[in-house]
Amino acid sequence: MKNIIITIVIGLAVLSPFNLTNSYLRTSEFDTVILQHGESIETIASRYTSDNEQLQELTVAIKEINDIKNDRDLRAGRKLQIPVIADDNQKVQVASR
């Protein structure tokens, strides 16, 4: 039991700093996207940002929010919650397919 608690505490300590810096994991705004055949999390994330750092953060957030552990969790027709953030000076815009 002690080992389980230690493992959980270490896991939280490792993951928590990343979650605090990833603004996509702190947002309360979400879009819903239906996964199409051949799409990946990265292609969906690229509709929301072209910045490489934000793209990586958004990809991580999409996987975490939708409990996606590997590619087998991705099936056409699956609804995904996409966290969105807006700059202070502009509205969020989604690039067309």
Image (spheres, rainbow, N blue to C red):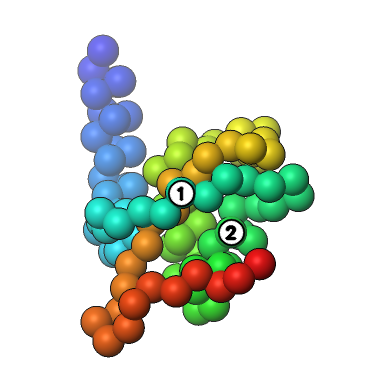
Q: Earlier in the sequence, mark 1 or mark 2?
A: 1
Asked if one can make out residue 80 in the rendered structure from this viewpoint, the answer is yes
- Residue 3 or 47: which is nearer the viewer? 47
Q: The disc labelled 2 sits on which kind of residue?
A: Ile
Q: Nearer the viewer, residue 24 or 75?
A: 75
Pinpoint residue 71: horizontal percent, then vertical percent.
Answer: 66, 40
Q: Measuring 29% from the left and 30% from the top, which residue is drawn there?
A: 8
Say which residue appears at 32% left-offset and 73% top-offset.
86
Is residue 13 shown above or below 8?
A: below
x 40%, y 43%: residue = 65
Secondary structure at badge 2 equals helix
* Image quarter hosting the C terminus: bottom right
Rendered location of residue 39, percent (x, y): 69, 52
Q: Which residue is mark 1?
A: 32
Q: Position of residue 43 (x, y in %)?
A: 64, 61
Query: Is residue 22 in view?
Result: no
**In the rendered structure, which amino acid carries the disc numbered 1?**
Thr
Whether residue 82 sits left or right of residue 52 in the image: it is: left
Instruction: Determine which of the numbered discs, if any, sits on residue 14 in the image.
Output: none
